[in-house]
Image (tube, coloured by chain):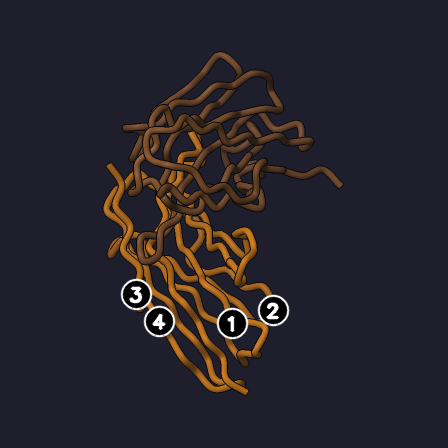
Amino acid sequence: DADVTQTPRNRITKTGKRIMLECSQTKGHDRMYWYRQDPGLGLRLIYYSFDVKDINKGEISDGYSVSRQAQAKFSLSLESAIPNQTALYFCATSDAAGGGQGGDEQFFGPGTRLTVL
Amino acid sequence: GENVEQHPSTLSVQEGDSAVIKCTYSDSASNYFPWYKQELGKRPQLIIDIRSNVGEKKDQRIAVTLNKTAKHFSLHITETQPEDSAVYFCAAGRNTGFQKLVFGTGTRLLVSP
């Protein structure tokens, strides 16, 4: 089945370290997203990309960067991790069809639990 | 930008009862309102969505209503079952052009047998 995968699934790191979270998809979708989930705060958008040449900041992009290496791959980097970046991170994809013609659903990966000590 | 508020944050019901979760949004240009269910330790998954040209949509035991004038929408689950226990997120966005969603803070639903 076409899917969205994330690596690693769990990561513990120390303050100041550089961390990369990777997302791959076999759904053939153009649009990819990175969210973080914190208890009581829901899902907040970090970055999104509508195709390989397009990268956009979300609500909470400070301290993060992304790279869209190919249609199927979208990586999130924490240049210098800090404890308040401890969270569950989700990648998601959607089709470009949208516009009420279907394709609006976002498909989430299994998540990466990141702990910054 | 869009702001989505969701209530209640937790909801406990007995099996067989109905559950209602409410959301309000701020951007009158939003026209797409999905609901996602996240079971413990799992990824969020879409369960139902509604577009602004529709006032109500049903799918078996779940339904969503939308009041564009008041800028609020609700999820209704009837005849709740223990497997409905999960966190539910509402979201709002525009499904033309960009598909950026703003999510609510989530409702933890607990259905007791």
Q: Secondary structure at mark 1?
A: loop
Task: Give chain A's shade.
Answer: brown
Residue under mark 4: which chain is it in?
A: B
Classed neighbour count for the residue bearing mark 2: other residues with Cα under 10 Å, few (<14), some (14–19), many (≥20):
few
Q: Are marks 3 and 4 on the same chain?
A: yes
**Tag nearer the camera, 1 or 2:** 1
Q: Are marks 4 and 1 on the same chain?
A: yes
Q: Is residue B9 above or below residue B19?
A: above
- Residue type of the residue flagged with mark 1: Ser
Dot placed on the residue nearer the N-terminal end, 4 or 1: 4
Image quadrant for the C terminus of chain B?
bottom right
Residue under mark 3: which chain is it in?
A: B
Q: Residue at x 53, y 44 (%)?
A: A10
- Residue type of the residue flagged with mark 2: Gln
Dot placed on the residue nearer the N-terminal end, 4 or 2: 4
Q: Are marks 4 and 2 in contact (CB under 8 Å)?
A: no
Q: Which residue is mark 2?
A: B60
Q: Are marks 1 and 3 in contact (CB under 8 Å)?
A: no
Report the Cα–Cα distance between label 3 and label 2: 23 Å
- Residue type of the residue flagged with mark 4: Thr
Q: Which residue is mark 1?
A: B85
> Would you identify the image quadrant in which residue A29 lies?
top right
Dot placed on the residue nearer the N-terminal end, 1 or 2: 2
Q: Position of residue B89 (x, y in %)?
A: 42, 56
Classed neighbour count for the residue bearing mark 1: other residues with Cα under 10 Å, few (<14), some (14–19), many (≥20):
many
Say which of B60 and A6 sits in front.
A6
Q: Which residue is mark 4?
A: B10
Q: Position of residue B104 (x, y in %)?
A: 34, 53
Q: Secondary structure at mark 2?
A: loop
Q: Are marks 1 and 3 on the same chain?
A: yes
Q: Is residue A27 above or below residue B88?
A: above
Q: Which residue is mark 3?
A: B7
